[in-house]
Amino acid sequence: MRIYLVNPSDVSFGTAVITPRWQYVLAAATPARHGTPLLVDETLEPMDEDSVQPGDVVGIGIHTGNALRGYRIGKAARARGAFVVFGGVHATLFPDEAREHGGAHAVVTGDGDLVWSAVLDDCDNGRPQPLYAGGRIDGQSFYPARWDLLPKDRYMWASVQTLRGCPKHCSFCSVWRTDGQKPRQRDVNLVVREIVQLRRQGFRFIALADDNFYPVTLADLAAADRRADKRQHAELMKIRQERFELMARLEQLPADMVFYTQITMEAAEDPAFLAAMRRAHIRGALVGVESVTPEGLKAVYKNFNEAGEGLVTRLQAFRRADVHVLGSFIFGLPTDRPDTFDATADLAQRAGVSFAQFVMLQPLPGTIDFGKWERDAKDVPVVDGVPLTRYWLIPQHHRPGVYSPHPMMTADELRTYTQGVWDRFYALSLVWQRSRILKSLRARLAFVLISKLYRQMYAKTGIATDSARVQRSALRARLLARLAHRLFVSHPMPELREPGRVALMTEKPSPVAMVP
Ligand code: B12
Ligand code: SF4
C-alpha cells in the first residue's frame, strides 16, 4: 500500500512560492509501518494518475479554489482501485460533496494530525470509514512537519505554523469559523526546532503560516483589564507573552533569516510588538486592508481597521519598523464606486506598502457573506449545469469571477478596473520607486523581479477568464519563477544549533510592561 498526498492545482509553475504545509504535516503523522508517503504538489508538476495502483491510499487536500481539480484526481484514483481520502478546509465544509464528486471513500474534517493514522490503518484493513472528525486539536498536539521530504530547489519559501485560529470575525473569511476564535499556539520549542532544521537544509525564507500572528491586541488587553474578573486578562497576557518568547528565540537565529507572516493592522499601534517582530527577522507581513473607505470596512465587519489617512499612518508604522507590508485589498464590495479603484491604488502607493494584492470579492463557503449570498440568491444562474451557489464545481475558465450583481458596475467593469489597479501598482516605474527602501542594486533588482513574478502568478492567472490566456500567463510566470528561485537559494548550515530559552522581563499586568 503506497500513500500519496496530493495538493491539486490546475496550473503548474515548475517552481512554487510556498510549501503546502499540510503535506509535510500529514507525512509526519504517517506511522512508519505504512512507509513514507509520496508528496505530489501540482503547483510544481501535474500528477501522473497512471502511477496509482489498486490498494494505494490517495489523500487529497482541498480548499475551495482547487476542489474541482481535486475531485478529478479522486475519481481517477478510485477508478484505478485506490482508497481515496479527502481533507482540508473545503472537505471540512462539504464532506458529502467530496464523496459525490470526488470519489471519496473517506473524508477527514478539521485537523488531520491525530486521526490520520487511524484512516491509514482502516484502509490497510480494507474498511475505511466514511467520515473521520479530526476536530480542533490543541496547539500542543500539532505535528511538526517532515522537512526531510522537501524536494531540493523547488520552493522559494517553507511554511511553519506557530498558531491556528483568529479572534476576529470578518464577514468574508472562514478561518474563525473553521479554525475557531481561540488562538491555539504551538510549543515554542517545536516551532524553533522546525525552523532550525529548515535553515540547516539551506532555507532562509520562511512563511509563518498563521491565520493572525497578532491574536491579542492592546485594546483587547485594556478591555479585559477593566473587568472585575481578571482571568481573561491573565489568559490574554499569557498568549501575548508566548508571542514575545517565540520572537526572542527567532531573534537569535542567523541574521540572514527572513520571516513573513499575516497580521491585522492593529499591530501598528503596538510599537513593542513591531520592534520585536523586526528583531525576530520578520521582514514582511500580509495585512488585510480590504477597503480604503469606512463604508467598505463596515460592510466586511472589519471596523477595527482604519480607513483614509488613518490607514496610511498605520501602514507607515510597519514601514518605519522595517516590516514590509503586502497589502491585501478587496474589490467588488457593494460600497465600491468607479473612483474607489484609483483611490485604492493611490493610497497603496502613498502608504508605502511594498507589495499588494487586489482580489475580487468572492463568497467563500463557511463565511457570513456566503451564507447571506446563498440565502438571498433568487433565480440562481446555472453554468455548465451547476448553480452559481456551487461555483467551485464550474470549470475554472467558465467561472464568472463576479458573483453578485454590483449596484453600480457590471462584472466586466469590475474585472477591467481591478486588472487596471494591478497594472498601475506593478508598473515598472512605480516598482522601481518602491524598491528605494533597499540599499544594494542587487536587492533592488530582486525586488523588481519578485514584484513582476507576484503579479504574473496572482493577477494574470487569477483574473483572466479564458484558459488560453491563463496558460500563457502561467508559462511566463514559470520562466520568471525559475529566475527568481535563485534568489531564494542559500547555503545549508548543518552545524546550526537551536537557540536556547531567553528570559523575558517579568511582566506586570499592564501591557506596556511587556516591552522587552
Ligand atoms: C499560509 C496560507 C496561504 C499561503 C500559503 C499556501 C500554501 N501553499 O500552503 C498563501 C499566502 C500563498 C495563501 C494563498 C491563498 N490562500 Co491561503 N491560507 C493560508 C493559511 C493561513 C494557512 C495554511 C496552512 O499552511 N495551514 C497549515 C496546515 C497544516 O493546515 P491545513 O492546510 O488546514 O491542513 C490541516 C487540515 O486541514 C487537514 N488536511 C488538509 N489537507 C488534508 C488532506 C487529507 C487527505 C487529510 C486527511 C487531512 C488534510 O490536516 C492538516 C493538518 O491538521 C490558511 C488558513 C487556514 N487556517 O488554513 C489560508 C487559507 C487556506 N487560504 C485561503 C485563501 C482564500 C487563499 C487564497 C485564495 C487567497 C487569495 N485570494 O489569493 C490564495 C490561494 C492560493 C492558491 N492558489 O492555493 C482560505 C481558503 C478558504 C477556502 N474556503 O478555500 C484560507 C482557509 C484562509 C481564509 N481566509 O479563509 N494562503
Ligand atoms: S480576515 Fe484575518 S483578521 Fe479577519 S477573521 Fe480572517 S484571519 Fe482573522
Image (spheres, rainbow, N blue to C red):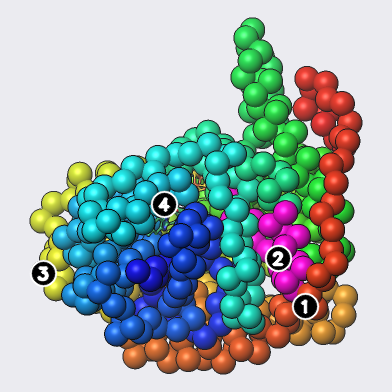
Say which label, 1 or 3, has the lower sequence index.
Answer: 3
The residue that label 4 is drawn on is 117
Q: Position of residue 97 (x, y in %)?
A: 21, 57
* Front-most of residues 274 and 12: 12
The residue that label 2 is drawn on is 198
Say which label, 2 or 1, has the lower sequence index.
Answer: 2
Q: Residues within 10 Å of mark 2 (few under 14, many from 20)?
A: many
The residue that label 3 is drawn on is 385
Verify whether residue 206 appears in magenta. yes
* Residue 450 drawn above or below residue 279: below
Say which label, 1 or 4, has the lower sequence index.
Answer: 4
Amino acid carrying label 1: it is Ser
Q: Nearer the viewer, mark 3 or mark 2?
A: 2
Q: Position of residue 32 (x, y in %)?
A: 50, 60
Tell me the quarter of the picture where residue 360 sits.
bottom left
Amino acid carrying label 2: it is Leu
Q: Nearer the viewer, mark 3 or mark 4?
A: 4
Which disc, if any, is residue 141?
A: none
Amino acid carrying label 3: it is Gly
Q: Residues within 10 Å of mark 4 (few under 14, many from 20)?
A: some
Q: Image check: 12 left or right of 467?
A: right
The residue that label 1 is drawn on is 490
Q: Image check: 269 left or right of 420?
A: right
Whether residues under marks 3 and 2 lie with C-beta atoms below 8 angstroms apart, the answer is no
Say which label, 3 or 2, has the lower sequence index.
Answer: 2
Q: Label 4's element?
A: helix
**Segment tinted magenta in the rendering:** 193-210
Q: Label 2's element?
A: helix
* Front-most of residues 93 and 345: 93
Verify whether residue 92 appears in magenta. no
